Amino acid sequence: MQVKEYKPLIVAFCCNWCSYAGADLAGNNRLNYPAEVKIIRVPCSCRVNPMFILRAFQRGADGVILCGCHPGDCHYTSGNYFTRRRMAMLFSMLDFLGIERERTRVEWVSAAEGAKFAATMTEFAEQVAALGENKRLEDLRCKK
Amino acid sequence: MQRIGVFVCWCGSNIAGTVDVAAVADALKNEPGVVFSTDYQYMCSQAGQDLIVSSVKEYSLTGLVICSCSPRMHEVTFRKTAAAAGLNPYMVEIANIREQCSWVHKEMPIGTEKAIILGKAAVAKVNLNAPLTPGESPVTKRALVIGGGIAGIQTALDIADAGFPVDIVEKKPTIGGKMAQLDKTFPTLDCAACILTPKMVDVAQHENVRIFSYSEVTDVKGFIGNFDVTIKKNARYVNEDICTGCGDCVTKCPQKKVPNEFNLGMDNRSAIYIPFAQAVPKVATIDPAHCTMLKTGKCGVCSKVCKAKAIDYTQKDEYITEKYGAIVVATGFDPISMDKFDEFAYSQSPDVITSLEFERLTNAAGPTAGKLLRPSDGEHPQKIVFVQCVGSRCDSCSEKGKEYCSKICCMYTAKHAMLTRDKYPDTEVYVFYIDVRTPGKNFDEFYRRAVEEYGVHYIKGMVGKVTPEGKKLMVRASDLLDGKQLNIDADLVVLAAAIEPDKSARSLATMLTASMDTNDFFTEAHPKLRPVESPTAGVFLSGTCQGPKDIPETVSQAGAAAAKVIGLLAKDKLKGNPCVASSDELMCNGCSSCEKVCPYGAITYEDKEFRMPDRTTRIRRVASVNPAVCQGCGCCTVACPSGAMDLRGFMNEQIMAEVDAICK
Amino acid sequence: MQKITKEQLTEKAVSLLRDGTVTHVLGWSAGEFDYDITPAVFSDEASLRKSFVWNDFCGANFSKYLVSKTRGIEGKLLVFLKPCDTYSFNQLLTEHRFDREKVYAIGIPCEGMADIDKVKAICGDGISSVNCDGEKLLVQSIYEDAPISVSPSDVLAERCVNCKSKKHVAYDELMGEDGDVLDSARFDEVSRIEAMSPDERFLFWQNELSRCIRCNACRDACPACTCEVCVFNNPRSGVENKSPANNFEEQMFHIIRAFHVAGRCTDCGECSRVCPQNIPLHLLNRKFIKEMNECYGEYQAGETVGSKSPLTDYTLEDLEPGEVFDRGDINA
C-alpha cells in the first residue's frame, strides 16, 4: 500500500463581505496557500452555528477556521461581536474536552487583506498538520 | 430530486491553466442529482449563457452549478441566465474555482482535485436549494440629503430636477458648507462664491426642495424605500417665514463680541446674526449662548427694531417626522484641530494660521476685506511659509495626525502661493512639502505655473519647528534635496491642516447602521464598483464624508449619488433580498433569543393559535420576521435554541451538506 | 432534616385549594421506593392527603413542569419552589415559556437533598425505606434488622454540597425564612479539570461520556430544554440522533446540549441528578458559566426576569477567542 503524505483537511467559513472577498483578493494577487483549505461562504460569521463546526470535525476535518470582518466593520454592524463570544465559548469548551485548541481559530480578515488571508491559511494549515489527524471528534464510520 | 446541470468554465486559461476542467466536469457527472455536466471556454459570454439556457431546456434542469470565478463577480449574471431559461434565479450555486482555486494553486492535479471538491459542495447545496421569491415593498418617493454643502446642494438639485421631492437638513443656519468660506478655487481660479451662491439660490428656489437649516437628524428607522426620519429643528428664535433678512437686528444688537465662526474666529459677530451676505435661507438666527435677552430676560433690542415682527424669544426646538425612500449622507469635513501640533506654534502666535483661515484672510468678504494682513498687527507679511501635510500622512503609530493623504492641500497651497505672489509680488513665498501630488486635470500645469511663472520657492522637506521671536516667526526646516538646514524669519506661517470627517458623522452612521472606516469616513458598498452607495441599502454617499475630495470630484460624486437615488425613487416597488431569516412556527419557542441579537429589529412576536393533534387549540407566542427589514445576516439562526429560525439561501441543512461534501 | 414539614406543605396546599386561589397543586408523590420520588399534579384534597410527599429526596426542579402543566387548566397551579428552582422559574419567564398569571408560587426553604447513591455507598444495597427522625436519616435495608443511622451531611448531593444560593428570587408567598446567595466552591472541580493536560482531559471525558446510554434523561429533566421540538429529534437540524447507535454521544451530543443551554443554564444540577450513568454533566454547564463569568462579567441566569444572557450580548472590547485560551494558560 502506498503511504500518502498526510495533508490536513481544513474547512474555512468566510463571511461574504470581508473574508470571502479577502480570499478572492488573495486569488487576484495570485497568493498561494495550501489547497487543503476549502472555503464555505456564509453571509456573516455570525451565521456559523457551532453545530457546523462540530459537524466538520465529525466528518473528518482536521481544522476549522472561521473568518469574518474585523470587529467594528461588520456589514451587519454587530454580527462578528456575537461570533466572537460564541466561538470563544465553543472553543474553550472543546479545549475543556481535550480537543486540541490549535485545531480551531477565529481570524478577522478584511476585503483588503488578501495577503493576510493567504498567510493565515498557510500558517493555520501548518499548525494543524503538525497535530496530525483529528481522531478525537471524528466519526470513523463517516470515513471512506 | 433535483435535476442539476454542472457548467465548468475555463475562463480562457485563467481556470483551465491549472484546473483540468474536463476532468472536473467528468467527476461531477456522478454526483447525486447531476444529470448533465459540461465545460466551456467562457461561461459568462453570450455563447456560454446560451449553452446554459439550451441545456436547461434539453435536460429539463431544475438547478445549476456553475464552476467559475467568484460569486461576487458573476453570481448575478448567472442568476439572470437561470431566469432567462425559466428557472428560479436562486436555483444557482457558484463553485469558486478561479479566485479560490486556479489562481492560488499552481499544480494541475492539486487544482483539479480541489475544484472537484468545491464543485461537489455546490452540487450538495443545490440539491437542497428551494426557489426563492423576493418580497416587495413600496418606495416613498422623497429623498433626504443630510448636509447642505456643495455635495448636498448638487445631489439635491439633481434629484429635484428629475422630479422627486428632496429635503436638505443642514445643521448650520445656512447652507453652503466649506465651499462658501473659500476665496478662489483651483486650478481655474474662479471665485468660489460666484459659482456656489447661484447654486444655493437655485436649490432654495427649487419647487421640489425643502431646506431645514439649523436642524439635525436625530433618529432614523425603517429600511430602503421606507425610512422614517426624525428631524430636530433647533430653535433660532426668529420666525423663518416672516424674517426678510434685512439685517436691522444684526446692526442694532448690542452684543457684538461673539467670535464669528464663519471667519474662524478671526473677527466678531453679534448675538443675532446672518452668517454671511449670501446666506440661504437669508434669515437671522439668535445664538442662545450669547443673547442677553435669552440669558437674562433683559434687552429685546432686536425684537424692537424688527419691522417684520419675526423675533420670537419663546420659540422651542421642533421635531418633525418625515418618510423618505432614500438618504444621502453629505456631512463633509473639518480641518483637524492644531492643538497637538505645538511645534508649529499655532496656539502661541496669531500669525500661525491654517489654510482655511488663510482663505478667509484673502476673501473679499473676510475679516480684512480681502487684504492679506497679519492677524497680529495688521501689517502686510513680507515672507510667508506654507507647511504642507500637517497631520496628513502621519505614520500609523503617531497619535497626532491621520495616516491618509488629505488630497486637496497640495493644490490649494499652490493656489495660495500663486495668488499671494500675484497680488503682492514683493512677498517671498516658501512651500515645504513631502511630495507634491497633482494628479488631476490641469493640476500639474497649475503647480508648475506657481513655481515657474510666480517664483514660489518649493522646498522638499518638513518644517521642524516654528518659534515666535519678536514680530517674526523663526522657521527651522530641512531642505532634503540640498541636504541643508534652513532658518527662515517668516511673517506668516500657513499650515495645511489635514481634513477629517465632520464630528456628527459617527452618531449618524450609528443611526443609519451604515459602516465607517477607522478614520470615521463612511464606507462605500464597493470601493470600485459601488463608490457612492453605503453598504446599507438605501443610504448613499456624497462628497468628503466618504473620503477627502476636491470640488470637481465632490460634484461628480454628488451627481452620481443623485443618479442612484433617482434610479431607486423611479421604482414603484422594491424587490428585497429573498435570502432572509424565517421562523418555523411549529418549532418556535417564542423565547426572544433571536430578537435580542437582531441588529435591524426585524423580529417581532405574536400569539398564534395552533391546532393540536388531540383537536384542542393552544395559543403560543411565536417569532415572525419582517422580510423587508431583515438583511439576512443569520445571527438569529444561531441564537435560536430550537433551530426554528433558519436563513433562506443559507439553510442549516445546506451549509451542513457543504461541510459533508468537503469532508468526504 | 428539612426544616419545613410535609404536614405544613399539605395544609398550605389544602387551604389554597379550598379558598379557590389555585385549582391544581404540583407536588411530589411516592414512587416504588422512598427515595424514588415522582412529581405529580393534585387537584383534590383527598389525593393530596393520601399521596403528597416531602422528604430529602424531593430534588426534582418543578419549574420545567410549569411549561406543560399550566397549559389547558382553567385556574391557577400551585407550585412549591426550592431556592435553586426559583432561578429556573425566572429563566423560563424570561423566555416566555409559561404564563406567570397561571402560577401561584410558594418558596420553601431547602436544607439540601440526599443522594441515594451516597446512601447506598454507606448502607449497601437492598434499601427498603428511608425515614428521618428529625436529625438523622434512618435507612432500613432488607439485609439488616435495625435501621442504619446516617448523618444527612454525609449523603448530601453534590449540587447541594456546592449550593449556590438559599435565596428565593421569585415567589408569590414564602414559607419559612429566606436565605442568602452563597459563596460556593462549585467551580473547583472545573478548575481541577482545566489544570489537566489536554490528553488527560480528553481521557477524563471519554471515560465519562462513553458511558452515556442516550436515555435523554438529562435533556428531559433540564429546565432549559423546553424546546417545542428538540434539535435531536428534528430531521432537518442536521444533528438528528434519537438513539445510541454510534459514538455521537461521546463526541457530539453533550457538547451540543451544553452549548444549547449556555447562558440560559441556571446550574440547577438536574442533568447530573437524573443521569443513570452518573456522568457529571453539570461540569460542562459549569465550565460555560465559569468561562462567561470570567470573560464577560458575573452573570447568573434566572436571577432576574428579562436579563440578557452573555451570548445574546456583546461589548466592543470583548476578548478574542485566542485571548480566552491565553487566559486559560495563566490559570493552568
Image (spheres, rainbow, N blue to C red):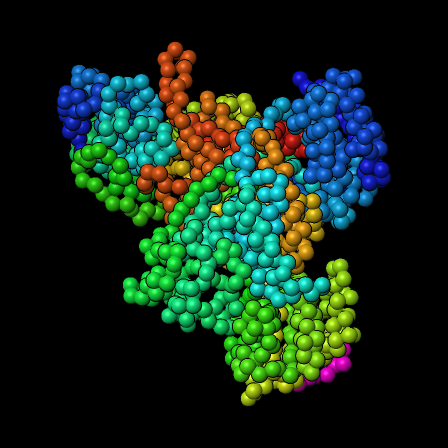
> Residue furthest toward the top?
B615
Q: Is residue C128 toward the left or the right of residue B509 in the image?
A: left
Q: Where is residue C183 in the image (x, y as percent from the top left)?
A: 31, 48
Q: Is residue A116 toward the left or the right of residue C176 in the image?
A: right
Q: Is residue B58 magenta?
A: no
Q: Where is residue B61 in the image (x, y as percent from the top left)?
A: 73, 19
Q: Residue at x 57, y 50 (%)?
A: B203
In the image, residue B136 sits, relative to residue B397, either above or below, namely above
The answer to whether any part of residue B557 appears in the image is yes
In the image, residue B544 sits, relative to residue B296, either above or below, namely above
- Answer with the quarter of the image where residue B359 lies: bottom right
Q: Is residue B325 toward the left or the right of residue A131 in the image?
A: left
* Nearer to me, B421 or B239: B239
* Nearer to me, B546 or B368: B368
User: Which quarter of the rendering shows the N terminus of chain B?
Assistant: top right
User: Which quarter of the rendering shows the C terminus of chain B?
Assistant: top right
Q: Which residue is drawn at 75% across and 20% down?
A: B56
Q: Position of residue B425 (x, y in %)?
A: 70, 80
Q: Does the magenta stretch include residue B486?
A: yes
* Nearer to me, C24 or C138: C24
- Answer with the quarter of the image where residue B577 lies: top right
User: Count the marks: how many?
Assistant: 0
Q: Where is residue B339 in the image (x, y as percent from the top left)?
A: 52, 71
> Residue furthest toward the bottom?
B470
Per the rendered image, the range of residues in magenta is B481-487
Q: Residue at x 56, y 46 (%)?
A: B206
> Residue furthest toward the front?
B307
